[in-house]
Amino acid sequence: MSTAADTTGATLPEHVNPAAVQEVLDGQWEHVRNGARVQLADTKWAPVYGEDIETARARITELARELAKTGQTALGFPVEHGGGGDLGASIEMVAFIDLSLMVKVGVQWGLFGGAVQALGTERHHAELIPKIISMELPGCFAMTETGHGSDVQQLRTTCTYDPDTETFDLHTPHEAARKDYIGNAARDGRMAVVFAQLITQRTPRGVHASAVPIRGEDGAALPGVTIIDDGYKEGLLGVDNGRLSFDHVRVPLGALLDRYGQVAADGTYSSPIESETGRFFTMLGTLVRGRVSVGGAAGSATKVALNIAVRYGETRRQFSAPGDEREVVLLDYLAHQRKLLPALATSYALHFAQEELTVMMHEVLGSSTVDTERQRELESRAAGMKAANTWHANRTIALCREACGGAGYLAENQLPLLKSDIDVFTTFEGDNTVLMQLVAKGLLTGFQDDFGDLSGWGKVQFAADRVVGTVLERTAARSLIQRLIEAVPSNTEETFIRDRGWQLATLEDREEHVLEGVVNRLRHAADEDTDAFEVFNDAQDHVLRTAQVHVERYVLESFVAAIDRCTDPDASALLNRLCDLYALHTIEQDKGWFLEHGRLTPTRSKAVTATVNELCKELRPYARTLVDAFAIPDEWLNCAILDEEPARQDAMWQEDSRLRKGARPGAEDTASEVQVAPGQ
Ligand SMILES: Cc1cc2nc3c(=O)[nH]c(=O)nc-3n(C[C@H](O)[C@H](O)[C@H](O)COP(=O)(O)OP(=O)(O)OC[C@H]3O[C@@H](n4cnc5c(N)ncnc54)[C@H](O)[C@@H]3O)c2cc1C
């Protein structure tokens, strides 16, 4: 039986059952994934092209309501309020269907419902959660302001308590303080969870959230609330983003979502968390599920694009090899394999890391005891995976579009929609660059500092000496990984390039080196006569690189751990080969660093590239199996080339052969005066 370390390069079994690979991919939440595949197996869910904005919004709203009826969107809410009580049950399957629907659903149940659940207390839950689950109460998550998006601790909306009326005065003091890009605001939202600076007894208490009605039953904005449509966007046509402003709107005391900060009727403020910054980032930390879902959704959209491009690449033919009558299928070209197969391997790797993250979230959020360090690790993982998944999605969907040539550019082939819809995933739920700084800060401080706060970089105490050890402890299958690394001979020059231990050790060594380097640079920030901000800013590229190499290391480890869980020997052998491709492609992409730091000799560096080429060739016959294992129901795809291309290629081939044998174009019989159409 093949194991997670079996990377001998031996011949792969001729046939690998996609269902066996699917089983590993579906993992712990197989029942949720299969539930969606069965319950939503209807073409009415599939994406639609060429709609106007109003039609798209109306259709997506209607589909969201229908989705609510299936129970899919309730799975993550507590049982006592009508949910499924399964924190890891994600809605990311919807992203296989349509990203507008995914985002609409994400706003309603993930962001709006999630904020009420995480920041509110029992009375909010009892009153609001059932109506949120059923979508009787469509809502918004109103945090971002025009002036402050990444730095949300600096929001300018105010929420001032008045003990005489026992209400808050919610106010937008100027244009930059208006809420912006808010999903569900322009058309459907009746209520918004509004984040604002809370002031009681003339004292600022930091950012808090309240559940504020914004529209009446008739759909009109309530008095004091101004709603402006954000209008056309690059993508996500079916999502109604808008701007919200409040002109001294009176909000009852009970509307404050007061799990982390309470206001008594007389205005006395209390909180279980003393520090304002600590409180704010604890509140944000509880909203981690949204970020996890966005990463998972980007992964699903990438799989759709790869499914289309691989299937097209298997049938589309261009140019013939000398002596061959029939033209070559695209996927037989190394250049085409190089486009799609490393991306496919990366999608698998990210999928397994995302699964590990979901398990971690399920455990941390479901635990009755609070483990602050583990919570910060979870936030760091969620941030890193959101960035890695969404950047990979953007690169890969663009590649897939290109890999389908002109056909990839036609709306009817789904890729243009995916490409325009996925773009903003790098920005919302946290800008990727900002998120990667959070990952680095968590690593450099050993998760001791407030996670999420990037303003105090200069003053933080760096703790790299203990950091690497702490972080490495936590990865799944750590003991297996340790054994593989320890088995690597000291003379790495002679180690087999496909040796999993060598690959793991190479990424681990890179992470340790980069981390130590940046700590040494930043320690100067603590010196009194240096400008802390300048020291940090000068090292910002180095800081971001720390996060990147950290993520790449644990993504590889997650892949290894997933193979270890696989019980089917053929699937395991195939996944091992794919894991080689992910590991060596990752090393190949960073050759400059490995060569600069003497980690690879020029000879070995060339061998890495040669092995990536070999792996592409070895995996090419399994490309279809690997995308079939995503098990995307046909009903969810609206892609003309998938239906038409095999038949079109066969028809072209038959017509072509007849022409070359002397037939008139389109004629049934052969004739002598044939004109063979010239090439373009
Ligand atoms: C379609 C869409 C839907 C959205 N939905 C919602 C919603 O429902 N609710 C909600 O509250 N918000 C929503 N948002 C807002 C979204 O979360 C913000 O746009 C996002 O957080 C980024 O903020 P920003 O736009 O102000 O960008 P900025 O923070 O201004 O970032 C601009 C650029 O500056 C860079 N940058 C920022 N800070 C740093 C730094 N310290 N170091 C280096 N570079 C930096 C960033 O990397 C980025 O490239 C949505 C946005 C969009 C586009």
Image: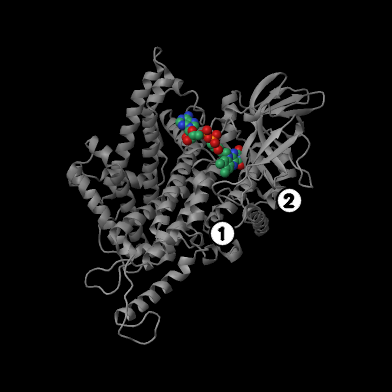
Question: Who is closer to the viewer here, 410 or 64?
Answer: 410
Residue 281 pos. (x, y %): 56, 31
Q: Secondary structure at mark 2?
A: loop
Tell me where residue 166 appears, x and y as whole percent. 80, 27
Q: Is residue 445 depicted above or below 637 in this figure?
A: above
301 vs 366, left or right, is left
In the rendered image, the quadrant that contains the C terminus is bottom left
Any atom of ligand 1 within 8 Å of the CB at mark 2? no
From the viewer's perspective, is residue 127 above or below residue 40?
Answer: above
Placement of the N terminus among the 4 image quadrants: bottom left
| Relative image position of residue 243 (x, y in whole percent) | 65, 38
Whether residue 323 is visible here, answered yes or no, is yes
Q: Which residue sits at x=56%, y=33%?
A: 149
453, above or below 659, in the image: above
Q: Residues within 10 Å of mark 1 (few under 14, many from 20)?
A: few
Q: Is residue 202 left or right of residue 24?
A: right
Residue that mark 2 sits on = 136
Residue at numbered disc 1: 49
**Which picture quadrant has residue 178?**
top right
Residue 500 picture location, percent across and down: 29, 49
Q: Secondary structure at mark 1?
A: loop
Q: Are marks 2 and 1 in contact (CB under 8 Å)?
A: no
Residue under the image location 30 percent in, 79 percent down: 660
Distance between the alpha carbons at the discs numbered 2 and 1: 28 Å
- Circle number at residue 503: none
Q: Residue at x 28, y 59 (%)?
A: 334
Amino acid type of the residue tagged 2 in the rendering: Glu
- Using the image as rendered, state which of residue 291 and residue 127 is in the foreground: 291
